Amino acid sequence: MTEPSAAGGAGPRGGADAGGKAAPGSDIPGMDPEILAAIRSGLSGPGPKKLPASLLYDELGTALFEAISALPEYGLTRADERILRRHAPAITRGLATPLLVAELGSGTGRKTRWILDALASRQTTHYYPIDISETALAKCATVLGRLPAVRFEAIHADYLAGLASVAAQRRSAHHLLVLFLGSTIGNFEPDAARSFLREVRRTLKPGDALLLGTDRVKPAPTLIRAYDDPLGVTAAFDRNLLARMNRDLGASFDLALFRHEARWREAERRIEMHLVAKRAHEVAIPALDLRVSFKDGESIWTESSYKFEKDDVAKLAKAAGFEVAAEWVDEEWPFAEALLRV
Ligand code: AVI
């Protein structure tokens, strides 16, 4: 998974508020100008500071997220996989064939294997993992690229562009199953989640389906431990965002001057990750020709992870033009996979 929204921003890849005119540093190779504009606006200005969450997922960040997935305190990924392992035959049973499978954010491909295995007895499946990270796609290819009944075609693109290219390739007899697993939708702001799913819906036809994973609300202490684990892996994942700005933009963040904090916002039903300055200081970001002042205790909001109640998914699905056809819930770590029909 490599494509979450900007914290407090609108959505994935470019959901952040890109400015109009070219600003210093807007043409740094390998850095999306919209992300650069979001860094500038997120750290300038008088309001609370925030950075695009997509910055968390460079190669090191993606590896750290995989380590998070193995933490005893972070049950989300294991719950997601348990559901797919136990219920893949039921999930795929009613789907029309021939079926193309497109996955938004390929991850390592481990969870998806259960779905592809369940389909293998019925058909040869065209599987299209879509990701902006070539590293993630390469890893996914090692897990899923050589399955006997799978035609694997990696798509290096953002989610919607990738999905549009799959939709453009399909023949009229083909049906499409879109996988959006791991509660990545929870990293979108609610408005952005709705409009994103509406866009997904627009590329689908009757008979197509979307399998949507969502993490359920849990007691606050459970959630805080999941996002601020005692080993400090999530803290490292969060702070890597600053290390990445040092690496890629020549910034002068002193990582020791920021501590990671997870906050549960009950009313909004979201976990927020923050990096909190331990004392007042200044940071330079030469590539953006920017100096940023931090007050003692001031935070940078780096990611939101929304949690869902049962009704939230049905409402979200309806607002996007889907219906919930079936839902599977993991009881050990409440997490749901909903099969949404067009
Ligand atoms: C990728 N996404 C679903 C994770 C989550 O739980 O929101 C990202 C994450 N951030 C910190 N830990 C995990």
Image: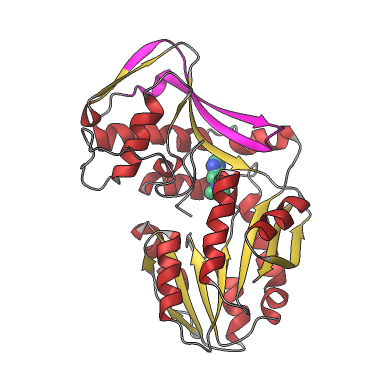
- Quick one: 250 or 289, which is closer to the camera? 289
Colour approach in the figure = secondary structure
Q: In x, y percent, where is residue 201?
A: 57, 66
Q: In which quarter of the image is the C terminus?
A: bottom right
Query: Looking at the image, which residue is at 35% across and 40% down?
Result: 18
Which stretch did the figure color magenta?
253-282
How many numbered circles does the render carry? 0
Q: In x, y percent, where is residue 171?
A: 46, 87
Residue 23 in the figure: left or right of residue 217 = left
Res 231 quadrant in image: top right
Query: Looking at the image, which residue is at 53% across and 89% down?
Result: 173
- Relative height, residue 313 to residue 293 (above, below): below
**Is residue 260 found inside the magenta-colored segment of the image?**
yes
- Quick one: 276 or 143, which is closer to the camera? 276
- Relative height, residue 14 to residue 178 (above, below): above
- Relative height, residue 271 to residue 123 (above, below): above
Quadrant location, ligand no. 1: top right
Q: Main secondary structure of the magenta part?
A: strand
Res 263 quadrant in image: top right
**Is residue 334 found inside the magenta-colored segment of the image?**
no
Query: Looking at the image, which residue is at 70% across and 81% down?
Result: 93
Q: In x, y percent, where is residue 208?
A: 60, 76
Residue 95 in the figure: left or right of residue 144 = right
- Quick one: 287 or 87, which is closer to the camera? 287
Answer yes or no: is residue 145 visible: no
Answer yes or no: is residue 42 visible: yes
Q: In x, y percent, where is residue 50?
A: 45, 30
Residue 290 in the figure: left or right of residue 49 = left
